[in-house]
């Protein structure tokens, strides 16, 4: 017996069309085959077998669907599916069984009501995977978002005076404490922070920057394009691989508004290369009465983290300010491990000019971002960031720790799907991703699977269609699962998801 819709398990549902065919003895409606005189049903007979919309919506079995999805959505989806069946019949397809019609409507409803933004399992080993939302938040940040979202909050009210306050003040104090700045401001992302700084400090004038730092960030956006939108004029100096302090000095003129340094966070120049130190560049800027703006990009809060990023030569925010930068910008959702945000830290006068610019309102962050950012910064202030922030735990995980986790997970995979693939643990490298720590590998151990029934790329595609979807790497015809980016709850569901993806869907059930 065929499976019916929700509310009628294990039953078939009779659907009556709008124009039933001639009735045989006994009064039962004729089947499409009988109506066409035997053999394959005609298209017209098949269409008559499809239900009328009013009859379909009146079925008791549709009650749960109507309650869950709403009558308008069910009607719209059902109409689309019925049209699809009519097209199929016009093309010579056979008439569907009643349960087929209901099943197609149910599948379409489920697909349409599934959130387009979904939780996924990241087994790629890329910690700050831009396509997967970069930094997963700490539990404290998630709780702060929920608290801010569940009711009203003091976003822009000074609770002492009852007057309107400044939302930036909610995180400014923590940022000043952590990086040693006079003032701080949060906006929507680091590109927005750079745009705001250039507009507030350099609009209509020249900004001097090294040719080697005219970077392109994700989505094809480039520093010169951001600068053009700010109203500032680009004055590039030096060459692709070598820029000297004298190049900056010779470029400074009456139209110069500021010097800009851009950290090469998403690429590296090696070999015959040169660039002035931050201290030398800051000294030149001070001597000429110009501000020095430093776009750090990923930026970490040394010395609170101080291990992986600092050991790999990634400059920190406190270090950049101490080196003489008047304004530093960096991302909230990269090495910081918080929500998407752009942070401006520096002198009170320069941050104040940015805060007063009209563009700041267009780039300001909402209460949920501020809640998550404040909770994340509080973990740094308490000295527990490395233990509580998922990104930092992932970056700090040693190869020995990851090998232990990989061995444990490999045993679970063998138990669940060892008959469908070869399983081994091997040495590999992870990546920080997200335009951070470019070219610097993080040693890891991965579970390498060799599928027996399907091509590895097909298994990879099935994993992406799973519930939840799983993202994994493929190399040398092996599916690689990196435990570095797996959260604790991921490891519990991964073996079953792997078995479902490894099984050949063409194989007949026993």
Image (spheres, rainbow, N blue to C red):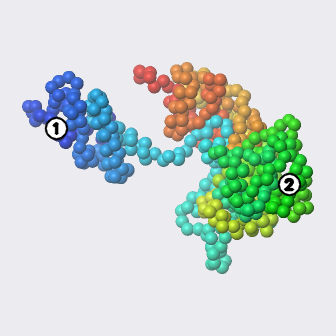
Query: Relative to 139, is 383 on the left or the right?
Result: right
Disc 2 marks which residue?
251
As helix, strand or loop, the secondary structure at mark 1 comes to loop
Q: Residues within 10 Å of mark 1 (few under 14, many from 20)?
A: some
Rendered location of residue 500, percent (x, y): 50, 30
Name which quarter of the figure residue 82 lies in: top left
SS category of the residue bearing label 2: helix
Kindly identify which residue carries mark 1.
20
- The dot on residue 408 is none
Mark 2 vs 1, N-terminal side: 1
Residue at 23% x, 31% y is: 43
Percent x, y of residue 53:
26, 46
Rendered location of residue 487, percent (x, y) = 63, 42
Q: Residue 257 occupies which quadrant of the picture?
A: bottom right
- Badge count: 2
Is residue 402 visible to the viewer in this orientation of the structure? yes
């Amino acid at each position: 017996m065929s499976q019916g819709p929700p509310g009628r398990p294990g039953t078939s549902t009779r659907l009556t069309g709008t124009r039933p065919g001639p009735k045989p003895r006994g009064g039962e409606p004729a089947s499409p085959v009988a109506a066409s005189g035997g053999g394959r049903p005609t298209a017209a007979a098949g269409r008559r077998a499809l239900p009328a919309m009013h009859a379909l919506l009146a079925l008791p079995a549709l009650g749960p669907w109507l309650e869950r999805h709403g009558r308008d959505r069910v009607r719209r989806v059902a109409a689309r599916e019925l049209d699809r069946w009519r097209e199929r019949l016009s093309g010579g397809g056979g008439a569907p069984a009643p349960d087929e019609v209901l099943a197609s409507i149910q599948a379409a409803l489920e697909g349409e009501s599934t959130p387009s933004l979904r939780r996924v399992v990241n087994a790629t080993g890329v910690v700050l995977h831009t396509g997967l939302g970069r930094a997963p938040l700490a539990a404290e940040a998630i709780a702060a978002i929920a608290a801010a979202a569940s009711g009203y909050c003091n976003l822009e009210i000074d609770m002492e005076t009852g007057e309107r306050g400044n939302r930036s003040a909610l995180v400014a104090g923590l940022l000043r404490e952590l990086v040693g700045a006079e003032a701080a401001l949060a906006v929507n992302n680091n590109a927005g922070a750079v745009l705001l700084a250039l507009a507030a400090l350099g609009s209509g004038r020249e900004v001097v920057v090294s040719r080697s730092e005219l970077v392109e960030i994700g989505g094809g956006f480039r520093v010169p394009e951001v600068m053009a939108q700010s109203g500032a004029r680009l004055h590039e100096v030096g060459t692709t691989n070598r820029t000297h302090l004298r190049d900056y000095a010779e470029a400074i003129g009456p139209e110069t508004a500021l010097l800009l340094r851009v950290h090469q966070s998403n690429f590296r120049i090696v070999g015959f290369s040169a660039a002035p130190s931050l201290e030398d560049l800051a000294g030149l800027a001070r001597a000429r009465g110009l501000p020095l703006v430093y776009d750090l990009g990923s930026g970490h809060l040394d010395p609170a983290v101080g291990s992986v990023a600092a050991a790999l030569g990634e400059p920190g925010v406190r270090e950049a300010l101490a080196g003489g930068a008047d304004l530093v910008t960096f991302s909230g959702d990269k090495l910081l491990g918080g929500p998407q945000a752009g942070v401006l830290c520096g002198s009170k006068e320069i941050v104040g000019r940015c805060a007063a610019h009209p563009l700041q309102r267009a780039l300001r962050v909402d209460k949920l971002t501020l809640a998550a950012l404040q909770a994340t910064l509080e973990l740094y202030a308490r000295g527990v960031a490395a233990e509580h922030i998922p990104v930092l735990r992932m970056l700090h995980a040693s190869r020995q720790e990851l090998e232990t986790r990989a061995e444990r997970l490999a045993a679970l995979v063998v138990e669940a799907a060892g008959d469908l693939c070869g399983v081994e643990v091997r040495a590999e490298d992870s990546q920080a991703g997200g335009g951070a720590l470019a070219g610097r590998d993080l040693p890891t151990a991965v579970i390498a699977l060799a599928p027996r029934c399907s091509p590895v790329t097909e298994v990879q595609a099935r994993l992406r269609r799973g519930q939840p979807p799983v993202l994994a790497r493929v190399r040398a015809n092996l599916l690689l699962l990196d435990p570095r980016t797996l959260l604790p709850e991921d490891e519990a569901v991964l073996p079953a998801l792997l078995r479902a993806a490894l099984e050949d869907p063409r194989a007949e059930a026993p």
